Structures are given as structure tokens and as C-alpha cells.
Image: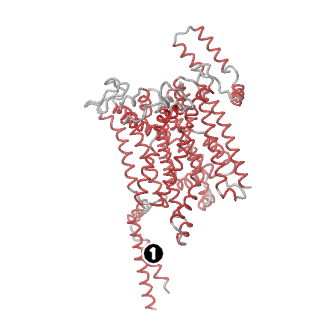
Amino acid sequence: MSQVPQADVLHEVAEPAPETPTGKRRASWRSLNFGPRMWVSVTIIGLIVLFALLGPLFYPYGSGLKVGSLYDEPSAAHLLGTDNFGHDIIAVLMQSTRNSLLNGLLAGTLAVVLGVVIGILAGYTGGWLEELLMGFTNIVVAIPSIIVLILMSMSLQHTNIGFLKGIAGLALVIGITSWPWTARAVRAQASSVATREHIDIAKLSGARTPSILIRDVLPYLASYVVMAWVLQLASAILAESTLSMLGLGPSGTDSLGMELHWALAFQSVSTGAWWAFLPPTIVLTLISFSLLYLQSSLDEVFNPRLRRGKKKNLAKAAERRAEMARQLAEQNEKVEVLS
Amino acid sequence: MGLRRYLARKTAWYLGALVAAVILNFLLPRLIPGNPVDVIVSQLGRGGLSSEAQQRIYEDYTRQFGLDKPMFQQFIAYVVAIFHGDLGKSFAFFPTPVKSLIGQALPWTLALQVPAILLGWIIGNVLGAVAAYKGGGWDKSVFTTSLLFSSAPYYCLAIILLYLGAIVLGVFPVGGAYSLGTSPSFTWGFITDASTFYWLPFLSLLLINIGGQAVGMRSMAIYELGSDYVNYSRSLGIGDRKMTTYIFRNAMLPQITGLALSIGAMIGGALVTELVFSYPGMGYLLFSSISSNDYSVIQGVTLIITVAVLVANYLVEVLYGFIDPRIRAAKSGEK
């Protein structure tokens, strides 16, 4: 007896405005729930990118221009003074940030593409191919990537191939050493997606494997791939600066790591020339922090279990549920009275 | 049964990784166009040696390092030498054996790394678990600070600490591991002297390790907080203190594997930290051998680091096998 009105009430509460497409879209955006963390990290990243890309258009000095001598103190003309070559620090910083970001973008994307391709192939196809690919991945994971990076970039230092000498070569090396993490995680997810029913339907309807992989498997991994990409960006930028500081960086090119390398080589810390080492240090920390912060906020967007509800919202939800229960009880009473 | 299978599988994997690492370590430097000897001799040439002398040095070096033999024979010789504990001789400090250079550097690195990793792991996990359990402002502040520390590149924090501690405050020495004029020995005077140099690099490593572990532990513990056994125990009226130990034990397992995985990732940053403080460990040795193109030392350092990381990972995984009840109970190994 009481089942019909009960279902009605639930229906009303669950879908408040199903008739208009705008209402629907709003609802799906709301479920993404971008928190303040997201905005903080996106703003920091945006500012850094603007500084690196647009800065050089407005700044009067070039990064290769000698405008002073060794570690000139900050002055009105050069707000952050000069580095060990007598170049203006701000100009060098802009150029370095741009190169470091570019390196991160190239290397991070390469790593994600490799990781996703290997992971999906292994996870979806299974069998001997999976054993082979994952065996390879497990071995590569076990060897510390910095060691392979050091050994490979040593050969880059003496290469005769032009494009490998600069940022691109370093990005290539970083990209091909940092994919195993992504591959492992993508494989785990892909093999769970591969057992779902829609894959069977796609197979029955005669779709080929590449199309199944791209259309039916990849979308289910999209959120993970985005997060992995953000992490890979950060770690590629850090890998570049580690290598550069060890003296394996792209010679003759500005990058955040090279700046630190020269600052240490010319004793800027012990001579108290803070303007030489603090700016690249701060920019590197900001880039790395905001990317990781972005990743963790994305994690909460995609993975509601990690979300810590605000107390206010929880209270609201509890109120709403109490209200629903009260309405339900009233309805039931009415129905009972009527019958 | 499960445990034995698990251990056998892990042993096989790590042996495979070790073989791959040795091959890579041998092969990659030899992919360099020309060979190490060319670079050394061309550097000598700049010093104004006659071409005849250069030729003689070139041939001598080539024979010394066995570069005139085919690749496969070189590899066999390389492996045999490793098993005899022979890592070759340094180019830059010829004829000092690489082994003794590494022998001087390794203790410094171990003294810095091992306590920083272990202490950082313990403190970080406790902090992360408490943050997840308490929630609210406590959680927010711990999480954000931990994220800041764990995302700050090792050397960035190191540089800032060095600047603040040694230059601005002037409390700590600027760099090195002991005062000039003293030499390493196990006397009380030397140890107190070295410990003033030890604090800054140790702190910079420790803070970052704490941050990384706390972030990981926090999300594991939040995940556990939402699980059924927690709700069930709560409804039984089990107290907070008891509950935290349950959650802690369950969230711990992934953190142990996390430790194994992070050792490899940490090593790069840790090497550069030594560089910032001019600490005479493996990182500093690596740096100076890179700048002097000392290939045999570079190869020796990378080999030792790889082996150390593999052994550390292997030990953690073995420990995991003993701790995780699922592995002990399992009839067949999971994939």
C-alpha cells in the first residue's frame, strides 16, 4: 500500500530538475566539487607559466646579456642583482623557468604515454604479453632511475646529434626512465576494466582491439591518467634539476637546475649572495608544491572516499535527510489514514 | 607455504633486477661516442703533451681498461672483477683504486641516510595517522606542511637551511663534514666536531622524509577510517585509543611497501643534498667524478648505489612477507 508514494518522494528528491539540460549539467559539475586547494594550486601554476612565457616580452634585459659583474647586489636597475656571469637574475630566471617547464612537459608527457601504452596492453591482453611487459617493468622499477639517468645523460654530454644536446635530449632521457610507475598502476586498473561487461559487448559487436582499448578502456582510466601526468610533470622538472646540479645538465642552456648548479659552483651560499640561489630555489619549490597539491586535490575530486566533508555540509546533509524522513513519515500517515 | 613462495618469487625478481642493473651499468657508459679514454687523452692534450706521448698514454690506458678487446670479453672481465671486489682504478687519481675512494665516502652517506630514513619513516607515520584521526584544523595544518616539505626538492630545503643556519644565524658550519686540520678517527673529539657538521644535512633529509611519509599515511588512514570494521568496532563501543591501534596496524602495511619503493626515489635527491653541504659522501664523490670525467669512479658509485638500493628493497619486502598475515595464510601467491 505505502510503497507507491514512498517511491514518488524518493524520485522527487533524487532528481530535482531533470527536464532542463542546464540543470543536469550543473548537477554533474557540482559532483566534481573543486575545493579551495584546487584553486590555490591552479593559480600558482598559472602565475608561474605567465611569468615564464610573457615575462620576457616585457622585461628589458635578455638572459644572455652581460649587464654587470660577479654577484652584483640587487639595485633599482636590476631588482635581483646579477649572477656569476653578470647576467640579470630576473631575465635568467624567466628563461630558466620556461626551459624547465618545457622539459617537464615533454618528459612528463612522454613518460605518461609510454606508461599508458604498456600498462593498457599488459592489463587488457593478459597472458604471456602481460607477464613479459610486467616482468620488464618490475625490473626497471627496482633499479633506481637516477642511476640510469646519470649514466644516460653522461652519453648525452658527448653526443654529436644536435637536438639531443639541449632540453629535448634531457627530456627524452627523463621520459624513457620514468614510465614504470604509471605502467604499473594503469595495468592494475586496465585489467579490472577488461573484465567488465561493456567490453564483452564491444567484442561481440566486432570492435577491433585497438578501438576497444581507446574507446572502451581508456575513458575509464582517464582520471587516473590525468593525475599521473601531473605527478610526472613535477618529477620530470625535479629530475632535470637534480641532473643539472650534478653537472649533467644541458650545457649552455638556462634551466632552474643549471642556475642552482652555477650558484653552488660559485659559492653564492657561503658568500651570502642570496639573490643568486633563492629565486630558483623558490620557483622550483613552488612548481613542485603546486603540482603535488593539484594532484592531491584532483585525487579528492575523482575519489570521493578521500574527501573529508566539511562539518557544515555534513550538518546540511543530515538536516536534508531528516527532512526527507519527516516528509516520508507524513506521506505514510496520510496513506494509512486514506486507506 | 605461502610465505616460502613469496620469498622465492621476490628473490628471483631481485636477482633479475641485479643482473639487469649490472648489464646497464656496463653498457650505458660504453654507448658514449668514442670512449672514455678519448676524453681523458684529449684533456691531457690541452695540457700541452706531445702527440707521441699522447699516443703512448692512449694505448696504455686502452690496454689498462681492456678497451681493445671485444665487448663480450670486456663484460666477462667486468663481472669477474666485480666478484673479486675490484672496481677498477680511478682516471683522475690514477692509480688509486675506485674501491678505496668509495670506501672513504660510503660511511658518511650511510651515517646520514640510514637514521634519516628510519626516523623520518616512524615520525611521519605517527603524524599522518594522528592527522587523519583527529581531522579538522590539526589535519589541515599537518597535511599542508607535510605536503610542502615532501614536495620541496631535497636540495631546495637543504639550500635554505644552509643559508639560514650557517650564514644568517651563523650557528652551524658552512659545509664539509669535519673541521679542517682534523682527520677522521674514532675519538671523542672528532665525533663531537663532526656532529656540528652533521645536523644541517641530517635535518634537511629528515624533514622531507617525515613529510613524504605523513602524506601517504594520512590518506591510507582516512581510507581505513571509512571501512566496515571501523564502523563495526565503533558500534561495539570500542574506545578511541584501541581504535587508533587497529587503524594504525592496517594502514601500516602499504606504508612498508611504500618505504621500499621510496628508497630508490630518495637516493637522487639525497645525493644532491650532500653536494649542497659539501658533505664528503657518495653524492659528492659522484659530482667530483662527473666534473673530472672519471668514468670508472662514476661506474663504481652507480653500481654500489644500485646494489645498496636493491638490497634495502629486498630486505623490506622480506620483512613485509613476515608481517602481512595474508601472505602467511595464503595457499597460493597472489599475482
Relative height, residue A330 to residue A84 (above, below): below
Whether residue A244 is visible to the viewer of this picture, yes or no, is no
Relative height, residue A101 to residue A156 (above, below): below
- Residue labelled with disc 1: A11
Q: Residue at horizontal 44%, vertical 88%?
A: A335
Q: Residue at horizontal 43%, vertical 38%?
A: B156
Kind of residue at disc 1: His
Return the residue nearer the eye: A111 or A214.
A111
In the displayed structure image, the side of residue A56 where residue A211 appears, left or right: right
Measured as percent of width and height from the top left, residue B129 is found at: 50, 56
In the displayed structure image, the side of residue A212 where residue A50 appears, left or right: left
Question: In which quadrant of the rendered view does residue B51 lie?
Answer: top right
Q: Quadrant of the N terminus of chain B?
A: bottom right
In the displayed structure image, the side of residue A235 where residue A35 appears, left or right: left
Q: In the image as oriented, which residue stretches furthest toward the right?
A: B1
Secondary structure found at label 1: helix
